[in-house]
Every structure is written in structure tokens, then in C-alpha cells.
Image: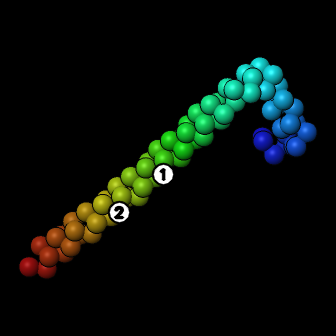
């Protein structure tokens, strides 16, 4: 979506934002937008790592159950 905007479109958006919000508010808006993106990325990474941990734990439990079953049938 953003790749189709191009440089002229991006400049137009920035000029409109400058007119609407003024030069004093733009740094605050940019900072808030950056912080939002950073928090979103952190939350996404946390979800991904949690899923990986759960998958690893599940695989380990399955291996233990299989090992216990094989020990019971072997004895």
C-alpha cells in the first residue's frame, strides 16, 4: 500500500500535515507515532516468542509421555 504512494505523494501528505497541525505539533505527533510502532513491534515479538515457547514445551511433554509409555510397555 505505501509503496504505491511515491515521493510526490509523501511530500503532499507531509505538507498537508504541516498545514493542519502546524510546525510545533509535528515533532510531538511523530514521536507519538514512533512510540506506538515500537510498542506494537514489541507486543508482536512477545506473542511470537510465547508461541515458540509453548510449542517447545508441548513437544517436550509429548516426548516425555512417549518415553514413559515405552518404559511401561518395556517393563
**Residue 66: x and y, percent?**
24, 69
- Say if 43 sits above or below 33 in the image: below
Q: Which residue is mark 2?
A: 56
**Residue 67: x and y, percent?**
21, 73
Quarter of the image where the N terminus is located: top right
- Say if 68 sits above or below 12 in the image: below
- Say if 18 sits above or below 40 in the image: above
Which residue sits at x=25%, y=63%?
61
Cα separation between marks 1 and 2: 16 Å
Which residue sits at x=18%, y=70%?
69
SS assignment at label 2 = helix
Near-viewer residue (29 or 54): 29
Q: Which residue is mark 1?
A: 45
Farthest-out residue, left = 75
Farthest-out residue, bottom = 74
Which residue sits at x=30%, y=60%?
57
Near-viewer residue (13 or 2): 13
**Residue 34: x and y, percent?**
60, 40
**Residue 72: x and y, percent?**
12, 73
Can residue 73 be seen at all in this image of the molecule?
A: no
- Mark nearest the camera among 1 and 2 is 1
Label 2 packing within 10 angstroms: few (<14), some (14-19), many (20+):
few
Quarter of the image where the C terminus is located: bottom left
Which residue sits at x=88%, y=43%?
7
Label 1 packing within 10 angstroms: few (<14), some (14-19), many (20+):
few
Q: Is residue 14 left or right of residue 72?
A: right
Q: Quadrant of residue 16?
A: top right
Near-viewer residue (47 or 19): 19
SS assignment at label 1 = helix
Can residue 39 be seen at all in this image of the molecule?
A: yes
Amino acid at each position: 500500500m505505501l509503496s504505491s504512494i511515491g515521493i510526490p505523494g509523501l511530500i503532499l501528505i507531509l505538507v498537508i500535515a504541516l498545514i493542519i497541525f502546524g510546525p510545533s505539533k509535528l515533532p510531538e505527533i511523530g514521536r507519538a507515532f514512533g512510540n506506538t510502532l515500537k510498542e506494537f513491534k514489541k507486543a508482536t515479538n512477545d506473542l511470537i516468542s510465547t508461541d515458540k515457547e509453548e510449542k517447545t514445551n508441548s513437544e517436550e511433554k509429548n516426548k516425555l509421555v512417549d518415553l514413559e509409555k515405552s518404559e511401561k510397555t518395556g517393563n
